[in-house]
């Protein structure tokens, strides 16, 4: 089977979406699928993302990227779309796959003869409602257009893959489609995780406990909750890996206000190939997600699975999206947005390392069984093959 995975932004790249795409296409190829990765030209190599050579059955096709150039100062993917059409006419494939809503809409309209599979990480119209002022006429028009676009994709795609059961529930309630909607998990790169040593806690009694937050610093990630928890935690430090300079500056200001600046290390950007070593060096990992559509219903956090793969105790917000994929036997739940709750759970882990170790062992087995890219690729490819054979 030959699939064209199409994205209007460069792949490989250091965007979170691109990191996920590279891991997914590598896993697809290792399962025997030929993958044509079609995107704007990239200056980043796949091995800088994976820490190894990507499977030989992946071929990268870099199309010209004129977005936001001096002669085309627009953030439009129309030119890229035209190039994709020209490429598809010359390169027959069994199916196209994309996680970009506009790209899926374009492919369904311009290439209806090619089966199109869409992967959704949120209900875009719902996320738009939460993040925009809908009393503004301009935003009302944007929402109407988004609803129309999303409804077409859910109606006409060969199948839609979503990352949580709650995305499926919300999408079906809104669009009432007959298109198959499948829940397929995100995962962890077991090859990369297995290449790092020191995955088992080696913390000495009485030494400081190092918390780790690794990832972006979007508001819905909820990192201020952990900073607010630090004053209640003795002998505990926090490492923050990731984030943009302006986001880090805001969090540093909060830390100064709470007088915990000396206990927080803002590491800034961490190269993808180094992320598992950063996790290995931590004692407890945190995911203080907020109770929003993205945090509470739509996220299937890669970092959760990567923490589990490195056998680290995880303290995470108790939200429906997280409950849909894991439970009390694998992670340690705290109340979203409640610093005292997070502090209490962290103290219990420190005070009872044996129970924490038992959970991390169970979580590691859970990852091996389900939440890894090989399992995700197997499930996705089987569903695509079944869909194609039914046509």
Image (spheres, rainbow, N blue to C red):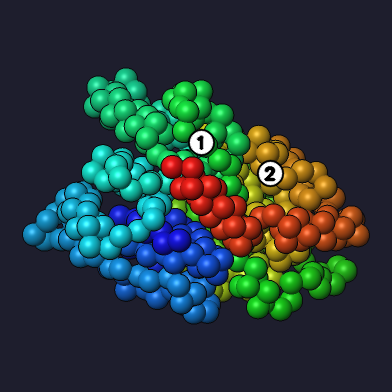
Work out whether 155 lies above or below 264.
above
Q: Is residue 391 left or right of residue 233?
A: left
Q: Measured from the top left, where is residue 111 in percent x and y?
A: 27, 46
**Observer able to see residue 311:** yes
Work out whether 216 lies above or below 335.
below
Q: Measured from the top left, where is residue 341 in percent x and y?
A: 74, 40
The secondary element bearing badge 2 is classed as loop
Q: Is residue 282 left or right of residue 138?
A: right
Q: In percent of the image, x 28 and y 63: which residue is there?
A: 91
The secondary element bearing badge 1 is classed as loop
Q: Nearer the viewer, mark 1 or mark 2?
A: 1
Q: Measured from the top left, where is residue 158 in percent x and y?
A: 43, 41
Whole-angstrom CA distance, mark 1 to mark 2, is 21 Å
Q: Is residue 158 left or right of residue 359?
A: left
Crowding at mark 2 (Cα within 10 Å: few <14, some 14-19, many 20+): few
Q: Nearer the viewer, residue 86 or 316?
A: 86
Q: On residue 378, which mark appears?
A: none
Query: Farthest residue in the left direction?
Result: 71
Crowding at mark 1 (Cα within 10 Å: few <14, some 14-19, many 20+): some
Q: Which residue is mark 1?
A: 180
Q: Which residue is mark 2?
A: 325
Q: Earlier in the sequence, mark 1 or mark 2?
A: 1
Q: Measured from the top left, where is residue 371 in percent x and y?
A: 66, 55
Look at the image and tell me in which quarter the C terminus lies: top left
Work out whether 171 lies above or below 213.
above
Q: In percent of the image, x 68 and y 39: which residue is there?
A: 324
Q: Nearer the viewer, residue 5 or 165?
A: 5
């Amino acid at each position: 089977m030959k699939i064209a995975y199409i994205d209007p932004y460069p792949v490989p790249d250091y965007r979170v979406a691109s990191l996920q795409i590279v891991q997914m296409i590598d896993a697809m190829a290792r399962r025997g699928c030929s993958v044509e990765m079609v995107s704007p030209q990239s200056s980043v190599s796949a091995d800088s993302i994976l820490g190894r050579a990507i499977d030989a059955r992946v071929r990268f096709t870099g199309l010209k990227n004129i977005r936001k150039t001096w002669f085309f100062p627009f953030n439009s993917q129309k030119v890229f779309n035209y190039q994709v059409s020209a490429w598809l006419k010359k390169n027959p494939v069994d199916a196209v796959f994309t996680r970009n809503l506009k790209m899926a809409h374009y492919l369904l309209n311009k290439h209806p003869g090619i089966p199109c599979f869409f992967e959704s990480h949120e209900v875009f119209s719902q996320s738009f409602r939460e993040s925009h002022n809908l009393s503004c006429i301009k935003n009302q028009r944007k929402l109407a257009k988004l609803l129309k676009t999303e409804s077409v994709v859910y109606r006409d795609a060969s199948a839609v893959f979503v990352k949580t059961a709650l995305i499926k529930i919300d999408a079906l309630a809104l669009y009432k489609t007959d298109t198959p909607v499948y829940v397929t998990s995100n995962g962890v790169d077991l090859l990369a995780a297995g290449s790092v040593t020191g995955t088992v806690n080696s913390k000495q009694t009485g030494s400081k406990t190092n918390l780790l937050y690794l990832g972006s610093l979007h508001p819905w990630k909820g990192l201020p909750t952990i900073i607010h928890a630090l004053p209640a935690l003795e002998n505990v430090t926090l490492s923050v890996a990731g984030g943009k300079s302006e986001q880090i500056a805001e969090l540093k200001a909060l830390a100064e206000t709470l007088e915990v600046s000396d206990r927080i290390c803002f590491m800034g950007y961490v190269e993808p190939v180094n992320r598992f070593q950063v996790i290995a060096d931590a004692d407890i990992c945190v995911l203080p997600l907020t109770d929003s559509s993205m945090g509470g219903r739509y996220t299937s956090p890669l970092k959760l699975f990567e923490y589990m793969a490195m056998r680290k105790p995880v303290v995470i917000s108790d939200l429906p999206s997280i409950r849909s994929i894991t439970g009390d036997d694998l992670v340690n739940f705290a109340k979203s947005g409640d610093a005292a709750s997070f502090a209490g759970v962290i103290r219990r882990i420190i005070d009872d390392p044996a129970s924490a170790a038992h959970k991390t062992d169970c979580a590691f087995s859970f990852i091996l069984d389900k939440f890894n890219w090989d399992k995700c690729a197997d499930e996705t490819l089987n569903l695509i093959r079944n869909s194609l054979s039914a046509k």
